[in-house]
Image: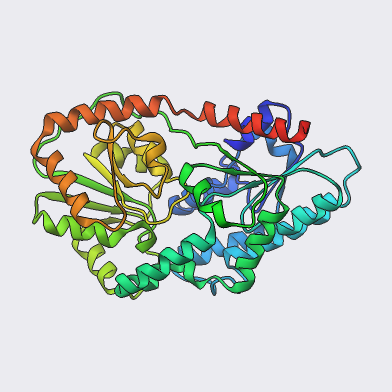
Amino acid sequence: EALVGLDRAGMLSEFWTAISWDPKSAINRALPRSLRELFGRRSFPESIRARTHTLPVRETMRLLTGAAGFSSRHETGAFSIDAVFRQLDRKVAKRLRKIKAGDVRAVYAYEDGALETFRAAHDLQLPRLYDLPIGYWRVGQQIFAEEAEREPEWASTLTGTLDSAEKLARKDDELQLATRVIVASTFTKQTLADSPCRAKIDIVPYGAPNAISSEIPPSFGKLKVLFAGSLGQRKGLSYLLAAVEKLQGAVELTLLGRKTANGCGPLDAAVQRYRWLPSLSHAAVLREMHSHDVLVLPSLFEGFGLVILEAMAQGTPVITTSHTAGPDIIENDVDGFIVPIRSAEAIAEKLEALARNRERLRSMKSAAQRKANEHGWGGYRQRLVEVAQEVMAS
């Protein structure tokens, strides 16, 4: 969506990424369905293909080994996501230093992949837009440390605690070099209060997809509850599981997402006990959302939580926390609920209320879909372009 917005505004000079997949290619047709879906998520608009530069080998190996059940060493592995980002960052920086003066007027880069690019842009006196998709790392580390003490059995799923001091320092260096910082939620902006960031911070919220159906299906029987996201404690998963336990069979739970770690006892037990879908295509995810009564995202530390708007667009109200974009979108008790972090009791209370009052649930479903219609991707593209134009003009 960022590419579409910048392209339509005539502002996109070059796009650098690891993989730009062509779903019409012969190799795509030859792949099994699971790999077609995996690589299909790395496809981009045809209109920008001639301006796209890729570094596919390392990322391809990361995806294939991950699909086979193997993972590279965190941060230092040859096929880790960090290695992919660092290689791309170095290539973009090298490219910038060779571009003719005046041919590029700004750079736009993402957390963990911006440092060398920003250093080169700084030397060339180019503005630097920094996209921070999640909250500031120091706040996250504090929350994770507290959580590891509260829920030690889930500590292995808090993968953010594995980042080295060097990686965390790079994050601060990126922030210090940024001309403008773009975040997707008020919560993310709030976490930057004690960061080294001195640039202006703009909130540019993400958008909602189209509804697969405007029809609100009737709800009967057990309340159908969906969790969608990586299965781990950053998402507050233990508190949802505890809430479901409190309701003693009054709800049916579906877990949609991959496990963030192996060997976590309560997580391994949960995927055996409840319906578990490790991975689905985006279209299938939206169908699952439409077929459920409520989505619960009890995240402890989130940048936005795109599944909130995705679910609401399908007529599925959301129970989430203030550590997401929920407060920016949801009107509490009208089209969803905002609950405190780490509160299984609050989650259980809201689920029980919806299970007992299906008319209220139906009303919230309609309200959620109406709210999502107000948050289309067009607004995201327009606001992103406005910020970029402002930065370049100044």
In the displayed structure, 308 sits above or below 210; it is: below
| Residue at the (23%, 64%) spot, across then down | 270
Q: Where is residue 140 in the image (x, y as percent from the top left)?
A: 47, 61
Q: Where is residue 12 in the image (x, y as percent from the top left)?
A: 73, 35
In the displayed structure, 159 sits above or below 36; it is: below
Q: Position of residue 237 (x, y in %)?
A: 30, 59
Q: Which residue lies furthest to the front in this view?
A: 194
> Is residue 240 in view from this perspective?
yes
Instruction: Tally the numbered discs.
Output: 0
Residue 390 found in image quarter = top right
In the displayed structure, 184 sits above or below 211; it is: below
Image quadrant holding the N terminus, namely top right
Q: Which residue lies furthest to the right in this view?
A: 100
Left-right relation of 26 to 135: right
Image quadrant holding the C terminus, namely top right
| Residue at the (35%, 29%) spot, across then down | 212
| Front in this rendered view, residue 201 or 238 | 201
Left-right relation of 5 to 302: right
| Residue at the (44%, 52%) spot, across then down | 302
> Is residue 264 in view from this perspective?
no
| Residue at the (18%, 44%) spot, across then down | 350
Residue 217 found in image quarter = top left
| Front in this rendered view, residue 21 or 242 | 242
Q: Position of residue 141 (x, y in %)?
A: 48, 66
| Front in this rendered view, residue 345 or 190 | 190
Q: Looking at the image, what colour scheme do you see?
A: rainbow
